[in-house]
Image (tube, rainbow, N blue to C red):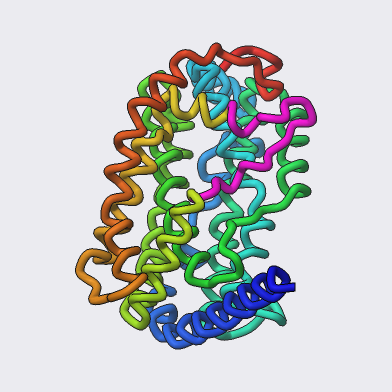
Amino acid sequence: MSAVMDVTDSADRRLDTASEHQEVISAIEPAVAENLRLLVPIDKAWQPTDYLPSLEAEAWRDEVERFRTAAETVPDDLLVVLVGDMVTEEALPSYSMALNRLVRDEEGTGPAPWARWLRGWTAEENRHGDLLNAYLRLTGRVHMRAVERTVHGLVTNGFNPQTQGDPYGLLVYTAFQERATRLSHGNVGRFAASHGDPNLARICGVIAGDEARHEAFYTRMMAEVLDHDPAGGILAFRSMLRGRIAMPGRFMDDGRDPNLFDHFAIVAQRTNVYTVRDYAAIIEHLVTAWDIAGRTVTGEAGRAQEELCRQAERHVRLAERTAAALAKQPPRGFSWIRDRKG
């Protein structure tokens, strides 16, 4: 009986905390309104067709052929990472649903700043999957049906940022992931350029630019939360890191490889697109950006503050061991590239 009561009490405490935190989220709406300028007006925004061959041009065949020839220079391992990144971007509906817990736009057309941000953010993010999907389809380098099945599987399997219903945790998660995504797309673009595909370099560069603006928004909003509630914000940050920030594509499934995300992550690590060292660097960046060390907190929040300030160093120590272990992993075949090895 006492165990049942403990579980109930714990759930009640989480609900109370989430409710209190939601009040702070509402209180920072003036800052949200001020930062809506981070969204680009539609008439000035880029669109996927700006970075693709024009199929309406008289010489469209020549444009497509040049596009495909450049894409031939992209190695298979980088292609695997690109597909994994694209699949993750295409699962946008799941992320929008999760963020609506933060925004509370029940009608879907609300005029409140949070609601306007979520709709604008979703519209900008929607272009990423569209553009990467079109690039991959036009190049002829991947097995698109396997890729499409993976997208279908990821959206069907859902998404859980593991925030336990805490809006602070959702802000921490999103700030972290926007930076991670920016790094990943930026690195793929740089490597594509070095191999000889300027088209993919431009595509990844413009997507990384969007992610940088979105990262700035969520990082600023969590800073506002910490200014209003330093203890609560610090405890939420620690809670998220103790569970390790779960990657949004971790439930990807091609119907064949039950460990597809892990195998994709190994290739991302080995190609230096996204590594354990990057994970540590993001923690260090957020600890600094949010002035965790400078916040005046006591008790459990004070202990969490000390723990957070040591987190990046701990992950740096893990980085070399992780890299060495992954270097021993044999290349694996991916359905995305018709069982060629990445």
The vertical placement of 8 against 306, above or below, is below
Nearer to the camera, 270 or 115 = 270
Could you tell me residue 15's position as x and y percent? 61, 79
- Image label count: 0
Nearer to the camera, 23 or 213 = 23
Could you tell me residue 339's position as x and y percent? 69, 14
Q: Is residue 257 a member of the stretch shown in magenta?
A: yes
Could you tell me residue 198's position as x and y percent? 42, 28
Indicate left or right for 222 with 103 as reference. left
Residue drawn at point x = 36 percent, y = 22 percent:
194
Nearer to the camera, 227 or 2 = 2
In the rendered structure, which segment of residues is drawn in magenta?
Answer: 245-263
Nearer to the camera, 179 or 328 = 328
The vertical placement of 142 against 273, above or below, is above
Residue drawn at point x = 64 percent, y = 12 percent:
340
The vertical placement of 106 against 205, above or below, is below
Q: Is residue 210 visible?
A: no
Q: Quadrant of the N terminus?
A: bottom right
Indicate left or right for 303 with 146 as reference. left
Residue drawn at point x = 22 percent, y = 64 percent:
293
Locate residue 294: give its quadrant. bottom left
Q: Is residue 125 visible?
A: yes
Residue drawn at point x = 43 percent, y = 59 percent:
175
The vertical placement of 306 against 135, above or below, is below
Q: Quadrant of the C terminus?
A: top right
Could you tell me residue 328's position as x and y percent? 47, 13
Locate residue 253: give its quadrant. top right
Question: Magenta part mainly helix, strand or loop?
Answer: loop
Indicate left or right for 153 with 47 as reference. right
In the image, farthest residue toward the front: 1
Q: Is residue 2 a member of the stretch shown in magenta?
A: no
